[in-house]
Image (cartoon, coloured by chain):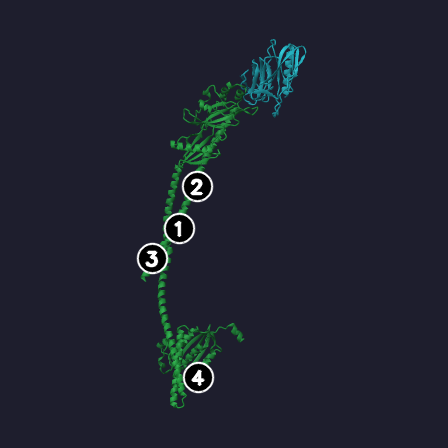
């Protein structure tokens, strides 16, 4: 949990700093109404990827809010990490911009074998130990949802949402989000709730802060 | 004597035969019963043994099968947890399903290159596999060579109504290159979502069946399978096949308890048929294990058993015959002897009785004659005496005439005495004389008799010595005891010499009283001694002695009637001595009371 918070904080800070560095203009804030958390007896509270009837979501629910539209070419996104820690992906749900290289460092004392059969990115990193260098990584250049699995630990599940936008954020547990540094213009704001449910609303970003809630 | 004895021996032989037959019947019945029970028990035991054997064998086979099934289920369970398979199914990558499975099932699908290896031996290598989707339909494999060739019809049989919740066992009849109608065990293993626990798909694996069909055990049990209304059983003749098929087709739809082992005779009880559903509760079509046990061997063994029982029975019967012959001979021997003896005894008795009857009649006649004669004589004698006494009263008689008449009267008295004695004797002979036993005072009777003796005429000047121990009492009747004494004293007087002696002694001895009466005089001749007690016997010296030879006989008969006897003790130049003994009178309480 601590780790996740630290990572989330780091992610948020880095994203904010990046976006604000590019164009410190529009800010979208709001709230996504998340579905009720499934009452699974999770002892160690983690964000886990669950699929029910082929629908992949996180548990407890989180949403990814991102902005679609045409943006000027941005520099290639920085490499991000989605490590395996305590036989789980941290974070369980990772949102990245298309073209991002994601590293999968092994922070456990055992082998992991990360692979994905998802259509946007099929890969198999093979078995590797924690000290494996360079850290196994993949570049995700097709938008879509990639489900991560470990060939050795059948219960491990992770997801990467590859987005064709540099403006995205994962909500907190309450569903609150904040996107900043958006150049003014007309966009579509989307909220990814699960592989089968993505909400969207048109939004016009100007000088001022925009408040937009997803019911 | 010859005729009855032969008759008796015929009877004895008949008895022996009857005894023998009875013993044989009993022995035969017992033997037959024992043999019957033995045979029944042996047959029952054999049948039970057969059932036990069968069940034990079946249990052993089922045990092996269960272990094998458990191993197979475990193998399949490991397979369905493979994340790649889950990924292919859950992440919408069905194109990667069979390629992923190929790697995962490499060990399972390994061909049996080494037939002695354990997996090959227990049929742990799969012949084919297929995936079923969430609805239970078969997911087609892109390359059937890698997943095991199946015809379209065979593949269609793998489909289930839906992805199962639990492992399912089924059977598939396949036409393979190796053999026709090969039976393959099919396991359908659910692939369950790790998140929700719901089945999302299933993998179906086919394993070569280790046991079926037509496998034959050492003791003649043939194993096959009833599947989809058809019998899969080799190693039986077409007729047997048809009969068993008919029986199963009739029996299986009605069998309620699928888990139970049902046993039925078929084909006129030449076979025993067992069947049992091997996949109860399975979503696949019900498959029945079918075992056929040929009863030919059983019947043969029963026949052998019967023959051995019969031969043992025959031997037993022969032995029993011999033994019973021996026993009946031994048993009947004393009986036969008894029969012969009794026959002889009977004959002798009949003869003796006849003789006795004759004698008795003669005796009776004689006695009656004596009695009649006595009675007939008594009256004329009385009349005669009365007439003589009448004559004597006449006054005109001379003293000589008087003397003669007196002498005649005396003779009539003698005649009366003889008649009395004869009457008495004849009564005794006829057994009509009953002594009324009372207490008799012998001392007083002796005194009276001695008185009478001294009063007798023609005294010989005899001296009487008596040595009597006081009061003597004997048991008897007064008049007869007196008669005995009179006779003895009379004899002692009559046969005495003039101036001789009479000696009377008495002594008690045990319960008897011995009375000895002796007299002097000529001794009785030795040759006459054994005749002195006969009737009308008179000694040589008795020609001039009055008497008629009845006295001693009468005395002895009376003494014997009194429970005593009369004997001649001695007869020599000094004494002739008779001894009579009486029973001592029993002192009765009432008498004691009287005397005291």
Between circles 4 and 3, the one closer to the viewer is: 3
Dot 3: chain letter: B
How packed is label 1: few (under 14 Cα within 10 Å), some, or many (20 or more)? few
Is residue B569 among the parts visible in the rendering? no
Q: Secondary structure at mark 1?
A: helix
* Residue matched to label 4: B454
Relative to B40, is B436 above or below? Answer: below
Please give the letter of the chain rendered in green: B
Quadrant position of the C terminus of chain B in the picture: bottom right
Q: Secondary structure at mark 4?
A: helix
* Residue matched to label 2: B45
Instruction: Point out which mark residue B263 bears.
Output: none
Dot 2: chain letter: B
Instruction: Point out which mark residue B26 bears.
Output: 1
* Residue matched to label 3: B10
Please give the letter of the chain rendered in cyan: A
């Amino acid at each position: 949990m601590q780790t996740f918070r630290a990572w989330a904080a780091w992610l948020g800070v880095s994203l904010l700093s990046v976006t604000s560095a590019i164009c410190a203009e529009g800010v979208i804030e709001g709230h996504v109404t998340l579905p009720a958390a499934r009452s699974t007896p999770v002892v160690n509270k983690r964000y886990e990827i669950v699929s029910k009837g082929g629908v992949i979501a996180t548990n407890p629910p989180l949403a990814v809010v991102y902005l679609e539209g045409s943006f000027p070419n941005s520099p290639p996104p920085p490499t991000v990490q989605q490590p395996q820690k305590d036989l789980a992906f941290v974070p369980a749900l990772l949102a990245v911009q298309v073209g991002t290289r994601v590293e999968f460092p092994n922070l456990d004392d055992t082998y992991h074998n990360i692979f994905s059969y998802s259509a946007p990115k099929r890969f198999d990193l093979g078995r590797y130990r924690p000290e494996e260098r360079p850290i196994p990584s993949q570049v995700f250049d097709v938008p879509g949802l990639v489900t991560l699995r470990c060939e050795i630990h059948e219960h491990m599940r992770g997801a990467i949402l590859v987005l064709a936008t540099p403006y995205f954020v994962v909500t907190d547990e309450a569903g609150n989000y904040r996107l900043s540094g958006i150049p003014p213009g007309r966009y579509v704001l989307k909220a990814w709730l699960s592989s089968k449910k993505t909400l969207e609303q048109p939004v016009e970003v100007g000088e001022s802060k925009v408040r937009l809630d997803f019911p | 004597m010859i005729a009855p004895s032969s008759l008796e021996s015929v009877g004895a032989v008949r008895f022996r035969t009857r005894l023998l037959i009875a013993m044989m019947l009993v022995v035969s019945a017992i033997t037959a019963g024992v043999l019957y029970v033995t045979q029944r028990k042996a047959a029952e035991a054999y049948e039970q043994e057969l059932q036990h054997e069968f069940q034990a064998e079946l249990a052993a086979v089922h045990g092996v099968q269960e272990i094998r099934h458990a191993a197979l289920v475990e193998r399949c369970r490991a397979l369905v947890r493979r994340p790649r398979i889950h990924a292919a199914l859950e992440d919408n990558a069905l194109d990667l399903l069979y390629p992923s499975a190929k790697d995962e099932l490499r060990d399972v699908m390994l061909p049996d290159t080494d037939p002695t290896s354990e997996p090959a031996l227990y049929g742990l290598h799969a012949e084919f596999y297929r995936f079923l989707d969430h609805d239970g339909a078969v997911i087609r494999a892109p390359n059937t060579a890698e997943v095991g060739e199946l015809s379209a019809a065979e593949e269609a049989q793998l489909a289930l109504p839906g992805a199962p919740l639990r492992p399912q066992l089924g059977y598939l009849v396949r036409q393979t290159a190796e053999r026709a109608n090969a039976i393959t065990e099919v396991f359908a293993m659910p692939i369950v979502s790790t998140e929700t626990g719901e089945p999302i798909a299933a993998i179906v694996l086919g394993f070569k069946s280790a046991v079926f069909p037509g496998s034959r055990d050492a003791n003649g049990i043939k194993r096959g399978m009833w599947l989809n209304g058809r019998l899969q059983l080799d190693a039986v003749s077409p007729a047997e096949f048809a009969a068993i098929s008919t029986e199963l087709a009739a029996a299986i739809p009605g069998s309620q308890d699928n888990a139970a082992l049902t046993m039925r005779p078929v084909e006129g009880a030449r076979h025993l048929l067992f069947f049992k559903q091997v996949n109860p509760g399975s979503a696949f079509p019900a498959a029945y294990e079918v075992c056929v046990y040929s009863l030919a061997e059983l019947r043969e063994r029963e026949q052998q058993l019967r023959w051995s029982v019969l031969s043992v029975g025959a031997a037993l019967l022969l032995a029993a015959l011999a033994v019973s012959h021996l026993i009946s001979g031994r048993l009947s021997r004393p009986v036969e002897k008894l029969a012969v003896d009794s026959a002889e005894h009977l004959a002798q008795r009949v003869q003796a009785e006849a003789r006795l009857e004759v004698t008795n009649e003669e005796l009776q006649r004689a006695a009656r004659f004596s009695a009649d004669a006595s009675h007939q004589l008594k009256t004329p004698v009385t009349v005669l005496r009365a007439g003589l006494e009448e004559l004597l009263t006449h006054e005109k008689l001379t003293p000589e005439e008087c003397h003669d008449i007196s002498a005649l009267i005396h003779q009539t008295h003698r005649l009366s005495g003889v008649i009395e004695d004869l009457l008495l004797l004849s009564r005794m002979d006829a057994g009509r004389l009953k002594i009324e036993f009372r207490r008799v005072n012998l001392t007083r009777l002796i005194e009276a008799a001695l008185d009478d003796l001294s009063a007798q005429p023609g005294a010989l000047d005899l001296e009487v010595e008596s040595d009597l121990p006081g009061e003597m009492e004997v048991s008897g009747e007064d008049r007869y005891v007196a008669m005995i004494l009179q006779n003895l004293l009379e004899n002692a007087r009559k046969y005495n010499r003039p101036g001789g002696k009479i000696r009377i002694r008495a002594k008690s001895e045990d319960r008897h009283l011995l009375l000895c009466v002796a007299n002097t005089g000529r001794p009785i001749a030795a040759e006459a001694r054994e005749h002195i007690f006969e009737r009308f016997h008179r000694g040589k010296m008795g020609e001039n002695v009055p008497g008629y030879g009845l006295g001693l006989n009468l005395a002895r008969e009376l003494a014997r009637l009194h429970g005593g006897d009369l004997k001649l003790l001695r007869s020599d130049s000094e004494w002739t001595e008779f001894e009579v003994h009486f029973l001592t009178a029993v002192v009765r309480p009432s008498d004691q009371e009287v005397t005291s």
